[in-house]
């Protein structure tokens, strides 16, 4: 109750005081009022009063809005947002809110948890997060489950290194159970770090409801999938030459072997194979794998190419080789003599003496050690004769099989074990790793007279993607899925999918599908999903198990784990009396598991059958281009085999993130910055935007540069943050100084009148329309550049060109309209950009939401911006013609800035004229419509627009369009270039009207020529004061010769600039009252005096010459130079001069008495006072009490009406009787202290 009483006293005293001044202005009334005011002020603590007032009026929204600091630490603010999301359980809350909405299905490819996320994971994760957030904010329910690839080489390789395991025999010693237990221990080694890092990067995905390929229910679905393939006859067992990792003791699929090619230097040897029927003549073959020579079974030539028998003139040896390859062995023709020439077909069937005898007896009678023919032998490498080791090369195997050297069911000749060591069959090199044995084999060849030539070759060679060791090609027994026969079906299903970018689908992936080979799905390993085949000892009875229940039924054993250490012990009684069936030893390739994830993550078909089938295929997946032959391929093969349709509808393929030097990122080389160090330095938003605004979203490679992340912060986030800060500062100023409450309601907001308001709104709505359309097409590479351009348009154009309006210089009504426009744009774009940069948009929203009207669409003050739906474009605000006009205005301004830079004429210095020339009047009309902004931005006094280019010495010239004309005219193109450039202005004018012209007999159209302006500064008709610049469409001429008054104004602007920088250095805000004291030398002394009013009006604070007077506290001082003259500035707290004047004045008011508070005199100029008032002069207090309740313009006008009895009149207030300087706002009311304002009623 006390508070309200004191409040009444406070308000009553204020009213009484102003009433006294209005009607009488006598010393007595003034004194009585001061006594009442002093009494009330003593009782009422001002701070408590302000706090009570805020709670008293709950509609004052600024009590909830947080002040926006000048500086922001983006990473720290992101951590605050992470805490907020955790506190409100934001992700799960958003899922609950969208429950029941249409489902949008997303599959997340599972990474291995044996290492920390790298930039490739971050990039793909960012793309996935953007698209799924966008889908959620578009009105869909989007489940996002994280998955883990737990089996296979990454885990086993780590265990092999830890335990020192070299091969299968070492695993046998410790046992599969012990080995798999070790794998279980590390399979989730970094799971916690992954969850922390992914969360810190802003990605919303469910780690609690994850899937792991090692979960029994996941593995059971894999068994079911395999059984479907088996029952369809798509599974078979065979031997096939495959890429083989000797470090990991396992074959790799073709797409795995293609992931890691490196440049290596290998030995290259040419060896001799003497003919049986001509011992003095030798076939010579070239190989880069000497270790395969012990397994040689044949030689191969091209039947259609020319071969020669030649004599080496140096050694007298006689050789047979391909004619086209003679240069590979001899440098000069004099070094050899051609004895005979013939086609390769002539050599077919000729027998030769093998180098090694290891398999001679075994294979001699099967037709081995003879010449075969095949067209795969080329003229490009070697000698044109290729040595055939049937079980160590794909072509070797194919050719030997076709010629009957080997058969599919024979025992393979493969004297190399799983660790890459020679077996006992190769006695001379037994136990040696094949790569190490190369040098010993070369030595043997030399000692036994079989070496013809030895060198080295640098070539690209496949390495194991896990162990980083060279692969070999080796025949291994394996289980295969028949893919080759379904190639056409795969291509058809591929056409039903949508890829971004499209060329990956149509070229790289489609080419891979056309040449699809049967898929080897088994691995001779331990930690993986066991292949569910139980086989009799003779291999003829096979049972395929498709579920845990089926295994229990047939074996009598119920299991809860499906790994080898459990199921290998289980046997199934033979149905045909062959004892028991035992499981085959192989496990599934982990690519089979990841390709099964759409079904296995749902435990299909054992659970969630309807839910899965309703949402299959997935709406969206995304991974790197390296998955073209990996995950994308296995997904398509399995879905086509199981359901006859593709597994997904839409796919974004990203490129690879490389080190800054273009090399592959390597932990060993340390050639890239730690991702989390970058996040902690610049923030996750900056890293996200840097990655997705790069070539990688077009499936190209990105050379990662940390400076690029920093530039996102500097060029995008800081300007956007400053625009947001500027908005909040001026909303606070509007409420504080004008007492106008700001609450935004899109439904009731009035349509803008101001041209630039219309422009930024149409630009924003067009952008929203564009982004929605492009996001529907998954084209992030077109969206992100436009979003970044928006920040530039907002900050460097709209805010920059409307600062005065936004700060209230044009009156409270226009200020409110400008702030509504800026709020609308920033708020709408926060919602649009939220999926892309989730932290900064959330940070802004948490403050902006308090300024939403309760009745507005989003007025319920949601806990997170990510709960809100995306805005729909407002068609009524879109005006393409305004966008086009402003674009032309921007072109003119940018051209003018270039000229200023070229002439070293800063914008601070005004110039006389800018001339804009264009042949179309419509373009000039657009430019003229933006005249005000062009003049302000370029600081020019006059704008001239004209189509009369001749007046200014301007003419047209033409340049040929090389891209169009070059291919069309071919060789004739060069002959007409000169003639095109010589076309006259008149000819080009006619061309522009007709759209056609003939040059040297060639008919040319608008697409063939580029028409440009040329400015001839030496022309007699051209004033020499102009500098020109053009964008090949618009030409501008800028008068760059300022007079002295312009130079002086430029110096005044330089002073303002230095003062503003000093204020910023002192961390002052516009609301802080200061007085500026200065001391200058040279021309600055005169300019500071002559332009005092201009400078004062600009900085909104008093400017006084030294010495410093008054009792104000000195804030900051600085000495500087401008154009060689000295300038010393000191900033002091408060308006020192006015305080001194009011203390010393005895007759400051029209009534003859100076009050303690600051005041302004008013004079009625064009009307008679009414309601009994006789005088035409009065005084109004600007504050009451001292330092508080500063008057607004509306309050001032109201008091003036009371003074002169003109309550029913519309009054306008001016700074002078000339009526040239109307007072439209009291932004800094106290600066009017002791001055006189002039009031007009007409």
Image: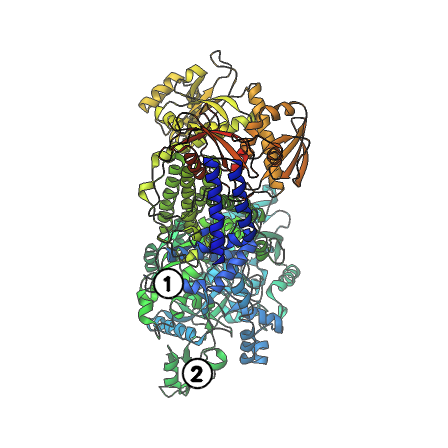
Residue 967 showing in the rendered view: no
Work out which quarter of the rendered image holds the C terminus and state it.
top left
Residue bearing the label numbered 1: 97
Q: Secondary structure at mark 2?
A: loop
Kindly give the residue lying farthest to the top in the view shown: 1020
Nearer to the camera, 1 or 664: 1
Q: Nearer the viewer, mark 2 or mark 1?
A: 1
Residue identifier under label 2: 559
Looking at the picture, tell me which residue is in the foreground, 527 or 1148: 1148
Can you give x and y, in whole percent of width and height, for residue 788 in the image?
A: 46, 44
Residue 485 vs 187, above or below: the answer is above
Mark 2 touches mark 1? (CB < 8 Å): no
- State the separation of the CA atoms marked 2 and 1: 40 Å
The x and y percentages for residue 862 are 41, 58
Q: Earlier in the sequence, mark 2 or mark 1?
A: 1
Mark on residue 632?
none
* Crowd around label 2: few <14 · some 14–19 · many ≥20 (10 Å): some
Residue 1225 coordinates in the image, percent (x, y): 46, 36
Mark 1 element type: helix
Residue 520 position in % (x across, y down):
44, 67
Q: Is residue 393 left or right of residue 504?
A: right
At x 47% / y 19%, what residue is drawn?
Answer: 1015
- Report the front residue among 1214 and 1096: 1214
316 with respect to 804 (left or right):
right
Q: Nearer the viewer, residue 1217 or 77?
A: 1217
């Amino acid at each position: 109750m006390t508070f309200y009483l004191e409040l009444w006293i406070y308000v009553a005293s204020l009213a009484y005081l102003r009433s006294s001044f209005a009607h009488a202005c006598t010393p007595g009334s003034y004194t009585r009022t001061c006594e009442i005011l002093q009494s009330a002020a003593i009782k009422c603590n001002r701070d408590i009063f302000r706090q009570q007032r805020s709670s008293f009026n709950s509609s004052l929204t600024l009590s909830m809005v947080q002040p926006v600091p000048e500086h922001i630490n983006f990473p720290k603010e992101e951590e605050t947002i992470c805490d907020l999301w955790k506190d409100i359980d934001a992700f799960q809350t958003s899922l609950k809110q969208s429950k029941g909405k249409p489902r949008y299905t997303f599959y997340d490819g599972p990474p291995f948890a044996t290492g920390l996320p790298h930039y490739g994971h971050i990039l793909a994760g960012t793309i996935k997060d953007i698209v799924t957030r966008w889908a959620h904010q578009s009105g869909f329910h989007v489940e996002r489950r994280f998955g883990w690839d737990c089996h296979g080489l990454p885990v086993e390789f780590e265990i092999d290194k830890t335990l020192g395991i070299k091969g299968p025999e070492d695993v046998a010693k410790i046992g599969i159970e012990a080995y798999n237990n070790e794998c279980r221990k590390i399979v989730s080694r970094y799971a916690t770090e992954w969850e922390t890092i992914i969360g810190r990067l802003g990605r919303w995905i469910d780690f609690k409801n994850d899937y792991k390929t090692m979960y029994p229910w996941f593995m059971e679905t894999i068994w079911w999938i395999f059984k479907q393939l088996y029952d369809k006859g798509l599974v078979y067992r065979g031997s096939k030459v495959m890429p083989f990792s000797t470090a990991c003791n396992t074959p790799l699929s073709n797409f795995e072997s293609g992931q890691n090619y490196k440049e290596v230097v290998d030995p290259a040897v040419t060896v001799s194979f003497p003919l049986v029927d001509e011992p003095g003549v030798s076939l010579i073959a070239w190989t880069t794998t000497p270790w395969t020579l012990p397994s040689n079974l044949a030689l191969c030539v091209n039947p259609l190419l020319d071969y020669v028998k030649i004599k080496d003139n140096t050694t007298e040896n006689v050789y047979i080789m391909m004619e086209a390859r003679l240069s590979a062995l001899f440098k000069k023709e004099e070094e050899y003599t051609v004895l005979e020439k013939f086609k390769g077909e002539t050599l077919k069937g000729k027998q030769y003496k093998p180098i090694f005898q290891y398999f001679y007896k075994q294979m001699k009678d099967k037709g081995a050690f003879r010449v075969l023919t095949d067209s795969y032998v080329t003229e490009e490498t070697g000698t044109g004769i290729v040595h055939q080791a049937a079980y160590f090369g794909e072509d070797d195997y194919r050719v030997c099989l076709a010629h009957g050297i080997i058969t599919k069911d024979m025992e393979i000749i493969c004297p190399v074990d799983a660790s890459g060591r020679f077996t006992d069959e190769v006695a001379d090199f037994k136990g040696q790793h094949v790569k190490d044995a190369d040098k010993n084999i070369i030595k043997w060849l030399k000692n036994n007279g079989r070496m013809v030539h030895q060198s080295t070759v640098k070539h690209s060679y496949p390495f194991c993607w896990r162990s980083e060791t060279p692969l070999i090609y080796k025949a291994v027994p394996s289980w295969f899925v028949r893919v080759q026969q379904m190639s056409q079906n795969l291509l058809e299903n591929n056409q039903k999918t949508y890829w971004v970018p499209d060329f990956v689908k149509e070229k790289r992936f489609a080419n891979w599908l056309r040449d699809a080979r049967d898929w080897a799905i088994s691995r001779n390993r331990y930690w993986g999903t066991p292949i569910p085949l139980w086989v009799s000892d003779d291999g003829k009875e096979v049972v395929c198990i498709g579920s845990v229940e089926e295994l229990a039924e047939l074996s009598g054993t119920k299991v809860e784990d499906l790994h080898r250490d459990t199921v290998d012990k289980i046997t199934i009684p033979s149905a045909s009396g062959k004892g028991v069936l035992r499981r085959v030893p192989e496990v599934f390739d982990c690519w089979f598991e990841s390709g099964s994830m759409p079904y296995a993550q749902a435990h299909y078909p054992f659970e969630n059958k309807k839910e899965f089938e309703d949402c299959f295929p997935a709406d969206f997946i995304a991974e790197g281009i390296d998955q073209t032959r990996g995950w994308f391929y296995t997904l398509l093969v399995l879905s086509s085999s199981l359901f006859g349709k593709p597994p997904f509808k839409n796919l974004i393929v990203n490129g690879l993130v490389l080190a800054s030097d273009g090399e592959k990122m390597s932990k060993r080389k340390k050639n890239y910055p730690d991702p989390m160090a970058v996040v902690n330095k610049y923030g996750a938003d900056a890293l996200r935007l840097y990655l997705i605004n790069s070539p990688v979203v077009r499936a190209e490679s990105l050379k990662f540069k940390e400076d690029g992340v920093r530039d996102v912060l500097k060029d995008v986030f800081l300007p956007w943050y400053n625009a947001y800060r500027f908005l909040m500062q001026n909303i606070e100023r509007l409420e504080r100084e004008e007492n106008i409450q700001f609450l935004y309601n899109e439904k009731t907001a009035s349509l803008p009148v101001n041209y630039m308001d219309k422009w930024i709104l149409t630009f924003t709505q067009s952008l929203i329309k564009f982004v929605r359309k492009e996001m529907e097409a998954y084209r992030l590479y077109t969206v992100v550049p436009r979003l970044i351009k928006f920040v530039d348009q907002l900050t460097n154009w709209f805010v920059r060109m409307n600062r005065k309006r936004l700060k209230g210089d044009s009156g409270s009504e226009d200020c409110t309209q400008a702030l509504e426009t800026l709020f609308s744009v920033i708020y709408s774009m926060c919602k649009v950009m939220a999926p892309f940069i989730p932290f900064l948009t959330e940070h802004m929203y948490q403050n902006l939401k308090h300024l939403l009207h309760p009745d507005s669409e989003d007025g319920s003050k949601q806990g997170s911006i990510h709960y809100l739906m995306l805005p729909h474009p407002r068609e009524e605000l879109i005006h393409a013609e305004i966008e086009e006009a402003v674009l032309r205005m921007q072109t003119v301004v940018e051209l003018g800035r270039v000229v200023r830079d070229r002439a070293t004429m800063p914008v601070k210095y005004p110039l006389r004229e800018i001339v804009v020339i264009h042949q179309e009047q419509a373009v000039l009309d657009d430019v003229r419509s933006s005249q005000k902004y062009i003049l302000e931005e370029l600081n020019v006094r006059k704008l001239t627009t004209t189509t009369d280019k001749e007046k200014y010495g301007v003419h047209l010239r033409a340049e040929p369009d090389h891209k169009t004309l070059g291919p069309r005219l071919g060789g004739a193109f060069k002959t007409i270039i000169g003639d095109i450039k010589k076309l006259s202005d008149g000819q080009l004018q006619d061309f522009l009207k007709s759209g056609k012209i003939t040059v040297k007999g060639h008919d040319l159209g608008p697409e063939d020529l580029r028409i440009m302006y040329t400015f001839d500064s030496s022309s007699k008709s051209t004033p020499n004061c102009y500098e020109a610049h053009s964008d090949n469409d618009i030409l501008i001429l800028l008068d760059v010769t300022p007079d002295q008054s312009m130079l002086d104004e430029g110096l005044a602007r330089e002073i303002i600039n230095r003062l503003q920088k000093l204020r910023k250095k002192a961390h002052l805000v516009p609301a802080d009252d200061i007085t500026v004291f200065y001391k200058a030398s040279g021309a600055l002394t005169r300019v500071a005096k002559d332009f005092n009013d201009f400078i004062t009006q600009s900085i909104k604070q008093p400017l006084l010459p030294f010495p410093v007077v008054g009792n104000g506290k000195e804030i900051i001082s600085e000495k500087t130079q401008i154009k060689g003259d000295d300038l010393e500035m000191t900033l002091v707290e408060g308006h020192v001069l006015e305080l001194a004047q009011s203390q010393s004045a005895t007759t400051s008011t029209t009534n003859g008495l100076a009050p303690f508070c600051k005041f302004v005199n008013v004079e009625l100029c064009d009307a008679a006072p009414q309601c009994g008032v006789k005088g035409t002069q009065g005084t109004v207090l600007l504050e009451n009490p001292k330092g508080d309740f500063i008057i607004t313009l509306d309050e001032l006008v109201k008091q003036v009406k009371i003074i002169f009895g003109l309550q029913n009149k519309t009054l306008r207030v001016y700074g002078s009787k000339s009526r040239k300087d109307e007072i439209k706002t009291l932004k800094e009311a106290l600066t009017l202290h002791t001055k006189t304002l002039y009031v007009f009623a007409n």
